Amino acid sequence: MKDAIKLLQEHDLLKIIDEELDIYLEIPHVAYVEVKKEDSKAILFTNVVDRKKNKKFDMPVLMNVFCNEKAVQLFIGDGDKIGHEIQSLLKMKPPTNLSEKFSTFGKLFALKNTIPKKLKGKGECQQVIKLGREAKLSDLPILTTWEQDGGPFITMGQVYTTSLNGELKNLGMYRLQVYDDNTLGMHWQIHKDSNHFFHEYKAAGKKMPVSIGIGGDPMYIWCGQAPLPIGIFELMLYGFVKNKNAQLVKSITNDIYVPKDNDFIIEGFVDPSKLRIEGPFGDHTGYYTLEEEYPFLEVTAITHKKEPVYLATVVGKPPLEDKYMGHATERIFLPLLKTTAPDLIDYYMPENGVFHNLILAKIKTLYPGHASQMMHAFWGVGQMSFVKHAIFVNETAPDLTNHQAIIEHILNRVNFEDMLISKGVVDALDHSSPKFAVGGKLGLDCTGNEIEELGITLLSDEELLSRMQNISSEVQALKQYFTQTKNPIVVIAVNKIRNQKYLFEELKPLFEHIKILVMVDVAKNSVDNAYMLVWRVTNNIDSNRDIFIHGHTIVLDATNKNSHDNFKRRWPDDVDCTQSVIDSLVQRGIIEVDEVFEKAFRICH
């Protein structure tokens, strides 16, 4: 971590805060505000305390290490260049002359670095060793990020596991809840490799060894969230990208190998016969994930460097660090995705679509129904299977990251006859689906030509709002977007008192003025904030339940669901900062949050 800190300083990407700040809410709130700035930097907190326990820590906390694109390039490299290297390997052909033989040999020889190297002896991560009851999680400055969190959580833990037979290794990144000094929750979701290993140990009636790394090379963190196929050890990706082996040492109390340069290692065993309630936790969806039973680690050792740095991240509403990490992932894994979908040209997962909730894809269309075929291909590929909403355009479309141009291109081509609504697996964190981990899928084929007619008579915002309010007092606010396109969007904020199908029926006389109507709750939403509306809508709708069509008009019900909708699950709260903490930090001059910033990212409400 000290090398990472030095690199950040050399590139003017580090803030150092020496004021005393608490691990309960204060430190994560500072990082949460910082990561949303256009000139976001990493932050090193040097004066860290736990006021509840009247404790001062002798180690700093580093946050927002992947603070922007430049930081990602420093720690990972050029995503496009790495992607091209992967593509050249995938397309490697037998050499036909001496020059090609040397080139091929060089590429293959470099692959030797993908295999992690197991070292003898101890690593820097084991300069200080604490065993048994001396190994206390409370000695680490583990943060409580949100007021409703179930407790402190490790948020950048590298979770190292192995299959029962020892043949498969995995590095994952999961949130880890602290229950007490020697017990740590394991939030590995049902689709994750570690969970698959867990069930192997459970069937065998054996305890599962787990070691958790914190800190070290930031590249480990990125590798831990990389969408690799099951059976591929993520540290092989480290070796490929860095062109050097990951250097590993054996844990002290189990047989798991971990990077020698981690700042901390937490070791232990999971008893597969035991579960306990984990959560709630304010997650990267911007919502709390609710309490559920998960396995837990019984800590047997904590080791660390002599002068460690505790690394953490903050999650919640976008934008976050994963904006920049996700962009690198897109570039690097595009060639691998093309092996399953060869006519894919490019793809983009906007951070305010929380990645798995929205994907835009550009494809080379060769025949009718090609986009629908690609939708099914995406929904059947690894982590892409969790995507809820997929929009496909052809090779003539603008750059997918040119938001204004690509949205206009899409809206000029939306045809309800080319819309696919399906059902399948969704992310375990998804809260909108009627059933856990299974929900609606929406695919839009916008690969064709512009539709011919607008088909409606546009009204001003004021006139349309007035007519709606004459029909129902539930409608509180209205704004129209992209009225220059063939499919303008009308967003209304409603005071929801019933199932929105009733409002849909009542508003039908106005559909001669509306192509796409989006409904959101008036509470905690502004019809003027397009960025956060995308976040809200893609989070809140389940396409099998929340899409209504009448004639040329489509309605999306993105309100919070409740008993009016026969919704049986608990609907979680938004992740919001604690106002009193933000006010205190502002008054002390540690952060700056004005009304414009607050409204742009809905920091506290």
Image: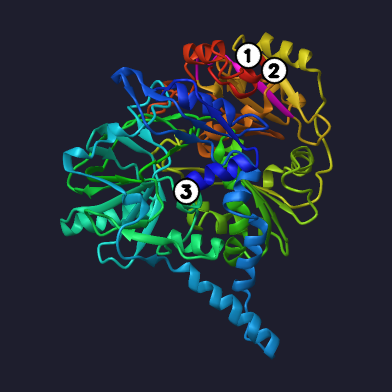
**Stretch of the chain drawn in magenta:** 489-498
In the rendered structure, does residue 166 fall within the stretch colored magenta? no
Say whether marks 2 and 1 touch (CB < 8 Å).
yes
Q: Nearer the viewer, residue 373 or 5?
A: 5
Please provide percent x and percent y for residue 249. Answer: 33, 60
Q: What residue is disc 2 on?
A: 478
Q: Main secondary structure of the magenta part?
A: strand
| Position of residue 415 in the picture relative to residue 117 (left or right) | right
- For image coordinates 76% across by 42% down, the residue present is 402
Q: What residue is disc 1 on?
A: 475
CA–CA distance between discs 3 and 2? Answer: 42 Å
Task: Determine if residue 388 is in view.
Answer: no
CA–CA distance between discs 2 and 1? Answer: 8 Å
Please provide percent x and percent y for residue 336. Answer: 57, 63
Q: Nearer the viewer, residue 522 or 35?
A: 35
Q: Nearer the viewer, residue 204 or 542?
A: 204
Nearest-to-viewer mark from 2 and 1 = 2
* Quarter occupied by residue 478: top right
**Local crowd at mark 3 within 10 Å, few (<14), some, or many (≥20)?**
many
In the rendered structure, does residue 491 fall within the stretch colored magenta? yes
Q: What residue is disc 3 on?
A: 221
